[in-house]
Image (cartoon, helix red, strand yellow):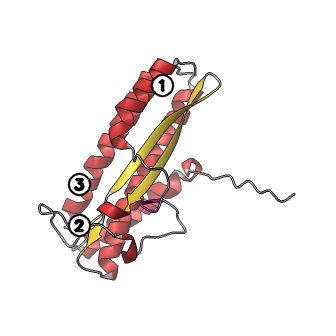
Amino acid sequence: MKTSIAALLFVSCSLFSFTVNNSESNDVIVWNEYRPLTWEDFQGKRTEDAAGDAGTVVQIKAKPYMVKDEVRYDVSAVFVKNKSWADAHTKELLAHEQLHFDIAELYARKIRQTIAELSAAGEDDVKVYNRAIQKLLHESNEIDIQYDLETLHGAMLDKQAEWTKNVRAGLKSLVQYKKHRQVVSADK
């Protein structure tokens, strides 16, 4: 996929609102199947307009970068600790908030899948990638709202169980698009 630096800058600016400015730090948790959320992760304060007993802020980062003449993307689902808050601390509520994070990861995988499919098809227009990513980010926001409405923020346990089952099935079906980290060791 060939592009110019100007086109790459366009993608960076247009996706800015969907990214977290700070890289991995003490303020964010990158989604990891082995690291579920705990109540200690909710370090923010309730806002005046907030509803419910907890608020989870998750974001999907889709950061473009260049490798030779190719644009690639680093896509991550992150939980923002200093903006997420909780007044109640039940096991059921934590499971509901965790699923918000899992939905973000599901859509991060859908974005990675779309990027891979466009690349395999030989697409080299960064704007096409950008539109596809933005469409999935918009869909992710709509699904997140639907999740809260259908489960009444986790209060309807049967609907919560249904959503949990469906999101887990979605994550499993897209396991090949899970973010893989490569560990480089200095040991030889």
Sequence-wise, the earlier of marks 1 and 2 is 1
What residue span does the magenta drawing correspond to?
A: 26-30
Image location (x, y in percent) of residue 80: 37, 59
Name the residue rendered at 27%, 75% in the picture: 157
Image location (x, y in percent) of residue 154: 25, 71
Choose top left, top right, bottom left or bottom right for residue 81: bottom left
> Which residue is tagged 2?
151
From mark 2 to mark 3, how far is it between C-alphas? 10 Å
- Nearer the observer: mark 3 or 1; the answer is 1
Prevailing SS of the magenta stretch: strand
Does 157 appear above or below 185?
A: below
Does 188 appear above or below 46?
A: above
Name the residue rendered at 63%, 53% in the picture: 181
Name the residue rendered at 43%, 45% in the picture: 61
At label 2, the amino acid type is Thr
Name the residue rendered at 15%, 65% in the picture: 51
Q: What element carries label 3?
A: helix
Q: What element carries label 1?
A: helix
From mark 1 to mark 2, how far is it between C-alphas? 40 Å
Q: What element carries label 2?
A: helix
> Which residue is tagged 1?
8
The answer to whether mark 3 and mark 1 are in CB contact below 8 A is: no
Sequence-wise, the earlier of marks 3 and 1 is 1
Does 128 appear above or below 60?
A: above
Residue at the left extreme of this rendering:
49
Would residue 77 appear left or right of 3 to someone viewing this image?
A: left
> Which residue is tagged 3?
145
At label 3, the amino acid type is Ile
Sequence-wise, the earlier of marks 2 and 3 is 3
Would residue 87 appear left or right of 163 to someone viewing this image?
A: left
Badge 2: residue crowd in 10 Å (few <14, some 14–19, many ≥20): some
Q: Nearer the viewer, residue 63 or 23?
A: 23
